[in-house]
Image: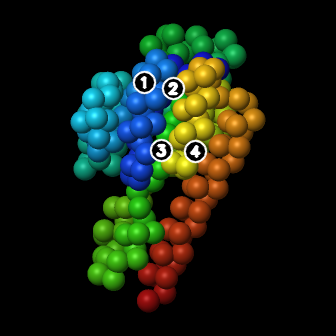
Amino acid sequence: MKIKRALISVSDKTGVVEFARKLHAAGVEIVSTGGTMRALKEAGIPVMYVSDVTGFPEIMDGRVKTLNPFIHGGILAVRDNPAHVQAMKEHKITPIDLVAVNLYPFAATIAKASVSLTEAIENIDIGGPAMIRAAAKNFRFVTVVTDPKRYDEVAAAVLKDGCVSGLLRMQLAQEAFLHTAQYDDCIQQYLRAESEK
């Protein structure tokens, strides 16, 4: 699967500018959100705002921005299923071939001595895990990257071949599900501890 469009939305911005620069050099269109988009723009990398894809603004203090059929349809479409391909055409959904997402820093937030329950809850990522899980589920067609340590390997493959091997996509999907599982476990442990106080 040639990678033509990538969605990049990261809390941990380690290495993301260089990663995006390499993807852009390989001809990949980049879609992004909020702080990530600003970082890429400031580095001179062309980037499309997610609201321009969805046709809908970020709302509710950023709680709702990527939960949209133009995003999830683009990630979840089974590219060799004619009905899915037809649905993309009918609804003008562009495929998203690479998803680079890492999540709000929940563990770091709750590690602060003065953190309130409200602040902790606002640092529970919803759209991020949804995109990660969607991309990981559809790893036959979509590359998902949750660990900045993988950026160089993925970018090198895209620059060389325009795509990422099926084996690497599966490995990245496994890492992605582990990432969201650990994230959810951290949240449930925190809420259990709070409820027992």
Question: Distance from label 1 to label 2 (Cα)?
Answer: 14 Å
Circle 4 SS class: helix
Question: Which of the labelled discs sits on residue 24, or is there none?
Answer: 1
**Quadrant holding the N terminus:** top right
Q: Earlier in the sequence, mark 4 or mark 2?
A: 2
- Badge 2 crowding class, 10 Å Cα cut-off, few under 14, some 14 to 19, many 20 or more, is many
Decide which of tag 1 and tag 2 comes sooner along the chain: 1
Q: On screen, 53 above or below 175?
A: above
Q: CA distance from mark 3 to mark 2?
A: 13 Å
Q: CA distance from mark 4 to mark 3?
A: 12 Å
Q: Position of residue 101 (x, y in %)?
A: 48, 44
Q: Amino acid at mark 2?
A: Ile
Amino acid at dot 3: Val
Amino acid carrying label 1: it is His
Is 59 placed left or right of 163 in the picture?
left
Q: Is residue 159 left or right of residue 91?
A: right
**Helix, strand or loop status at disc 2:** loop
The tag on residue 96 is 2
In this view, the mark in front (1 or 3): 1
Which of the two discs, 1 and 2, sits closer to the camera? 1
State yes or no: discs 1 and 4 in contact (Cβ < 8 Å): no
In the picture, the disc for residue 150 is: 4
Measured along the vertical axis of the image, is residue 3 above or below residue 192? above
Q: Quadrant of residue 97?
A: top right
Quadrant of residue 135 within the rendered picture:
top right
Residue found farthest to the bottom? 197
**Residue ID for mark 3:** 101
Precedes in sequence: disc 1 or disc 4: 1
